[in-house]
Amino acid sequence: MTQAPRSVAGTFRKIVAVIVLVPLAMIIVAFAVANRQDVTISLDPFNPGQPAYSKTMWLFVPIFTVLILGVAIGGLVSWLRHGKWRRMARRYEREVIALRGEIASLRGKPEHSLVPGQVPPAERLQLKPPIS
């Protein structure tokens, strides 16, 4: 019963991804084709006439390079900032595993031994089963 909504949601997500990604890919390809003119990239701000290093390339190459670098740096910063939450999740997962193991070991023991230090009631205070 829970599998049907997940498969519908998964299919819907795939359809939306195709609807978004295909036009985006077409726009990126059109941008790259439209910006094929050569530009000179210079990394020397002090001597623009005779730069120490310059490279001539298509315009879309440095734009895509900077875009990809920005996404990678943003992802790295986000990953580093969420380290505290990942560490906490690992700690809680270890605690859950330890508590599940403790519960499993206690399930096989009698009821009165679940509380440490509890002594079973005396024989005269225990209820007798009804006579049938």
Image (spheres, helix red, strand yellow):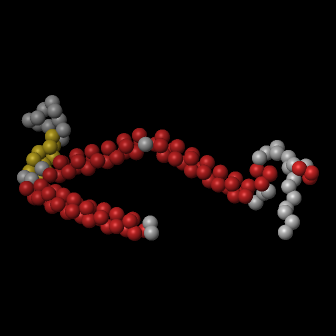
Is residue 92 shown left or right of residue 58? right
The structure residue drawn at horizontal position 7% and vertical position 56%, both measured from the top left corner, is: 34
Is residue 116 shown left or right of residue 41? right
Q: Nearer the viewer, residue 76 or 101?
A: 101
Q: Position of residue 21 (x, y in %)?
A: 22, 60
The structure residue drawn at horizontal position 17% and vertical position 35%, both measured from the top left corner, is: 44
Picture layout, residue 44 above or below residue 3? above
Q: Quadrant of the C terminus?
A: bottom right
Q: Nearer the viewer, residue 89 or 105?
A: 105
Q: Quadrant of the N terminus?
A: bottom left
Is residue 23 shown left or right of residue 2? left
Picture quadrant of residue 105: bottom right
Q: Is residue 54 visible?
A: yes
The structure residue drawn at horizontal position 21% and vertical position 62%, both measured from the top left corner, is: 19
Q: Is residue 52 visible?
A: no
Residue at the right extreme?
A: 124
